[in-house]
Image (cartoon, coloured by chain):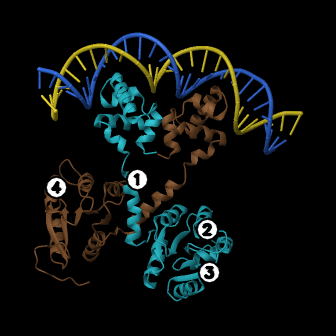
Chain colours: A brown, B cyan, C blue, D yellow
Amino acid sequence: MTVYSKKKSQDSMDIISVAIVEDNHDIRTAMELLINGSEGYACVGTFNNAETAQEQIPHLLPNVVLMDFNLPGGMNGIECIARLKAEFPDMQFMMLTVYEDDDKIFQALEAGASGYILKKTSPGELLEAIRDVHEGGSPMSSQIARRVVAYFQKQAKPNPALEALTSREKEILDQLSKGFLYKEIASNLYISIETVRRHVHNIYEKLHVRSRTDAVNKYYNR
Amino acid sequence: MTVYSKKKSQDSMDIISVAIVEDNHDIRTAMELLINGSEGYACVGTFNNAETAQEQIPHLLPNVVLMDFNLPGGMNGIECIARLKAEFPDMQFMMLTVYEDDDKIFQALEAGASGYILKKTSPGELLEAIRDVHEGGSPMSSQIARRVVAYFQKQAKPNPALEALTSREKEILDQLSKGFLYKEIASNLYISIETVRRHVHNIYEKLHVRSRTDAVNKYYNR
DNA sequence: TTTGCTATCACATTTTCGTGTTAAGTAATT
DNA sequence: AATTACTTAACACGAAAATGTGATAGCAAA
């Protein structure tokens, strides 16, 4: 793909403007040089902490923001993304980090990051990922993708502990989860309150919980 | 349950065995030729419908199954994956289809597919994807990945009614959702039980609910 | 200054919940 | 025929939660 390097001040039409938030000086500088040295990319700002980024990025309005996870100061990268994304929904964020844990990945995606790549990624792939996220993709390694996919597969199958429940107990638990009072459940299922209490008691025993809320949380696999 | 026979495990150490379920004859044959013509890959079976695949794949035990979406007969590719995956959790499934709709993607992932690639993918990339899924990745185009990521971001945004809560109330609600007793919440937040009660009362009023479970359900957007 | 929102604490009463114990009828299994 | 598991039901006790009302105080906006 060739880029028509016009010298017009109305930039960001063909050139992808990028901001970098990364506390490590060497990495930050290396990425800045890489981006500014590549046709079609321009680094419009670099920041070593979330607070400054938070303050400056609204003025720079880059197309893509590369964000580190750990940053000095009170705000981490996730929170920084969440705030900026809320204000600028069209801005694209890409996590650029060393972490591969599920927690961090999901937090980043929920906060509004669209891409998630590791710092060990090669310069060429990094540039490609920046273009990719700018064009509506979600660049991530297939290992990262597998984590995300695993989340779906987990969601799909319910807690195995629920299998131990009888069908009547599941029915009761479903009613519990909807917030019905015992008397309402009794009336809904045409049984006495005492029976409801008995079932609830058995359910709690099987799920190893001691309260309705905990039981419902298990029911929804939390 | 995943017991491979001795002689099979020996030659499937380096070679990835693949099965293809695809009703279009030309595509099926082309893929078979591609796979058998490439070093490190072996096509151990091809099927033009889900029923036959269902019956034969348990005997073939391929490492990777390429699955089409639409198949003739009663069973579609999704259901076929779901059944086989339940019996052979270590078998890897990759959707190979023309569809890019969210529904189909999510259905496939929930059923147990780990990869999702489009039929327009080049032969080289297909082979790479097969190896990738076999090695624990989840190959998918970054456009597909974006759909999946978007799902997370949708999930993430909470019930707008929660916006009406003050930050303290949200904190209380979060504690409620975790099943803490009032006294525990009081102790966790260093306030009196009476204050907890007051907050809970206000929360219920703002969310228009009358019980803890209902409040928690709203909190989780159900 | 007043008004409104938030956070805090208190008292009284009623209702619901969690637990323990007992037990009868049914259905499936051994 | 005996055993086991499930569903149903009742009574009692104490803890927890819900309801209703009243009060004080800080803080910010009108």
Residue positioned 65% across, 29% down in the render: A195
In percent of width and height, residue A144 lies at: 38, 64
Q: Kindly identify which residue carries mark 2.
A: B80
Mark identifier at residue A49: 4
Residue positioned 39% across, 36% down in the render: B207
Q: Is residue A217 above or below residue A99?
A: above
First along the sequence among labels 1 and 2: 2
In percent of width and height, residue B147 lies at: 40, 64
What chain does badge 4 belong to? A
Secondary structure found at label 1: helix
- Mark 3 closeness class: few <14, some 14–19, many ≥20 residues within 10 Å: many
CB under 8 Å between discs 2 and 4: no
The type of residue carrying mark 1 is Gln
Q: Nearer the viewer, residue A32 or A70?
A: A32
CB under 8 Å between discs 1 and 4: no
Residues marked 1 and 2, same chain: yes
Q: Nearer the viewer, residue B144 or A20?
A: B144
Cα distance, mark 2 to mark 3? 14 Å
